[in-house]
Image (cartoon, rainbow, N blue to C red):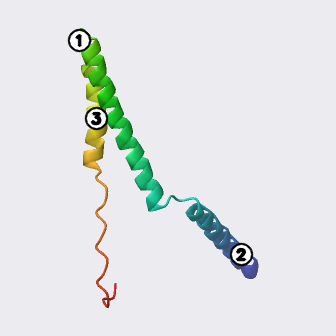
Amino acid sequence: MCRRRRRNRISTVIAMLERLHERMDHMATQEQVDAIAARIESAVSGLRADIEALKAAHPELDLSGLEGRVADLEGLDAENPAPVPEPAPEPGEQS
């Protein structure tokens, strides 16, 4: 019975490792994350431009709610800045 339990534990650990490996295969690369961040930044800039165009075309409209939501998005970006990459080691240095 002890061997059976040990085999079950080993099987469980192997299954967990396989699931972890599958998850790692589906993780984004840094390049993909950077591309997503660039798309978001572009979208926020586009929203700002659209709001400015609406204000110019319809000065009677109160667009403060829209401006506030865009500012919230920009604030989230400021609260979570992209990590600064560490400099590459000089030739001959070990990392």
- Res. 48 mark: none
Q: Answer with mark 3 or mark 1, whichever residue precedes in sequence.
A: 1
Q: Residue at x 34, y 30 (%)?
A: 47
Please state if 68 lies on the left or on the right of 11 as rendered. Answer: left
- Residue 59's tag is 1
Residue 83 found in image quarter: bottom left
Provide the residue designation for mark 2: 5
Q: Identify the residue at image location x=30%, y=18%.
A: 54
Residue bearing the label numbered 3: 72
Horizontal arrangement in the rendering, residue 39 relative to residue 55 (left or right): right
The answer to whether the residue labelled 3 contacts the one labelled 2, judged by CB atoms less than 8 Å apart, is no
Marked residue nearer the N-terminal end (1 or 2): 2
| Percent position of residue 3, x then y | 74, 82
Front of the two marks 1 and 2: 1
Tell me residue 94's x, y (percent).
Answer: 33, 88
> Considering the numbered disc 1 on the image, is that residue within a helix, a strand or a loop?
loop
Query: Looking at the image, which residue is at 29% across and 71% down?
Result: 86
Image quadrant occupied by the N terminus: bottom right
